Image (cartoon, helix red, strand yellow):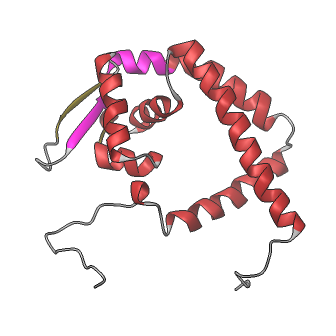
Amino acid sequence: MADESAPLAPVELGAYFALIEVSSLLRHAIEQQLKEAGGLSYVQFQLLATLGDAPEGRKRMTDLADGVVYSRSGLTHQAGLLEAAGLVTRAPSADDERSVTVTITDAGRAVLAKVFPGHIEELKRLFLAPLDRDDVEQLARSLGAVRDHMRSAPPRSAAPRRRGGSPRQTGA
């Protein structure tokens, strides 16, 4: 294992700053495209796209929050905005009375169909254009490994909720 107290090598620091900048530039461009094409925020698009890919177009709110790494309260707000726009419905879960299930509507699917072509075009133009097939495959492997590592100890918004009635342990 690498010495965690050692300073980053220039190439490591460069990779980190490049990732941050690429992420910021890409997210900004995608947010603009989604807003112009469908009146969606980035998070709203993530939610609709996740629901669109889900079996029967529905997921529990906690599973959505865990998947998109968004606070549960923030997700509740975004789902409320999508519901008010007629793009999703919310209902008590049939499996767990404490849970809420979100389902994409036909109108939500129509908005996804409207924004996807421009979304794909932006991804190709900004993110994929300077890369060849081997670069994309290596990037997918590298980012997949980092994602999997980070998901092994996710932030609270991405951590599955504890099941069962045992009290939390506290450090005294």
- Which quarter of the image is occupied by the N terminus? bottom right
Q: Which residues are magenta?
A: 100-112
Q: Nearer the viewer, residue 133 or 3?
A: 3
Residue 112 vertical placement versus 55 (above, below): above
* x and y, in percent, of residue 167 in the image: 17, 74
Give coordinates of residue 31: x percent, y percent: 60, 26
Residue 105 belongs to magenta span: yes
Say which quarter of the image contains residue 128. Answer: top right
Which image quarter: residue 124?
Answer: top right
Which residue sits at x=70%, y=59%? 141
Q: Is residue 70 above or below residue 4?
A: above
Query: Is 81 left, or right, of 143 in this rendering?
Result: left
Q: Give the residue at x 42% y 56%.
A: 158
Let me know if residue 136 is in the magenta part.
Answer: no
x and y percent of residue 57 in the render?
Answer: 33, 33
Q: Position of residue 148 (x, y in %)?
A: 56, 64
